[in-house]
Amino acid sequence: MSTEIKTVKTAGFEMKYFCFGTGRKTMVIIPGLSLISVMTSAPAIEAAYAVFGEEYTVCVFDRRSDLPGTYTVADMAEDTAAAMKALGISGAFLFGTSQGGMIAQIIAAEHPELVKKMVLGSTAARMDDAAGRRLEKWRSLAESGKTEELVMMFAQDVYSEDYMNRYKDAFKGLAGMVTEEDLRRFSILVAGTEGLNVYDSLDRIKCPVLAVGDRDDRIFGAKGTIDIAEKLGCEMYLYEGYGHAVYDEAPDYRSRIFEFFEK
């Protein structure tokens, strides 16, 4: 499967993205932090979300190509919103995971015309001290150039033990693919979450929302999901035993998103 990577250009930046599917409705996926660009996983993402292809045209966005030295989650949200507008996307079915979920919350609050329905996966509206400390460890390893140690810590924090055991060799192989530029970008993106608190602005979100998490999430726990659901009064579902990347591991996760978007 070959997925074409495209570039959307605005007045201030460029951003890579790819789309697949033939549906009349538009689904936008905003992924979380990754050590290398999610664009490298385009064929795998297209295959994983194939169930959406008939009803939706699915677009997956990267972060902007030329990251400034300081780049907050709010900046990421404004850039993603600008990229969506440049492509003529509005009334989208928005799915954001982890940092992508933080971005999605801001877009829905500040640009309500862009979002018709939203699923927030393994995310939070505000960073707590435990999550902040964990991400700071990642950033320290990235800035020290300790790539293999970073890859293994990131994987252990994000994935379940079973998943880690099955794909340990793949994660070790990933370490050899990470460049100095990848580490620089990762460090900037991690730093962008520092002090994040959009909890009070959630009142401005008017679209239907489904918040999904996992009780064994090592980054946000169940609290991040519960926090959002209680503030919004929205639907919520909590898995157990998969960890932060439940969106990659739970076999019914994508069908759950599809059902929420379709009802």
Image: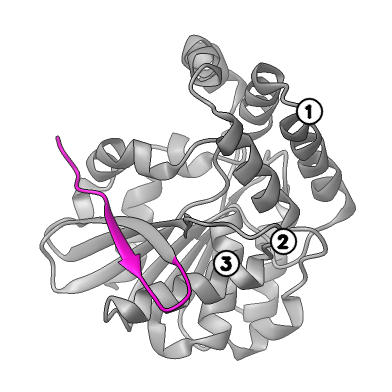
Q: Disc 3 and disc 2: Cα gap in Å?
A: 11 Å
Name the image colouring: one colour
Which mark's residue is nearer the viewer, 1 or 3? 1
Q: Label 3 amino acid?
A: Met
Q: Which mark is residue 144?
A: 1
Mark 2 secondary-structure assignment: loop
Which mark's residue is nearer the viewer, 3 or 2? 2
Q: Disc 1 and disc 3: Cα gap in Å?
A: 25 Å
Q: Horizontal and vertical percent for residue 91?
A: 33, 83
Q: Quadrant of residue 140?
A: top right
Among the two numbered marks 1 and 3 on one chain, the one whose residue lies closer to the N terminus: 3
Please name the residue shown 40% across and 47% down the image: 253
Q: Say if residue 208 shows up in the picture.
A: yes
- Give whichever of 24, 67 is nearer the camera: 67
Q: Main secondary structure of the magenta part?
A: loop
195 lies above or below 234: above
Q: Disc 1 and disc 2: Cα gap in Å?
A: 18 Å
Please name the residue shown 54% across and 41% down the image: 34
Q: Which mark is residue 70?
A: 2
**Can you say which quadrant of the picture contains the N terminus?**
top left
Segment tinted magenta in the rendering: 1-13
Q: Which residue is mark 3?
A: 76
Compared across the picture, whether 239 is left or right of 255 comes to right
Query: Within 10 angstroms of label 3, few (less than 14), some, or many (20 or more) residues?
Result: many
- Give whichever of 25, 3 is nearer the camera: 3
Residues at circles 1 and 3 in contact by the CB criterion of under 8 Å: no
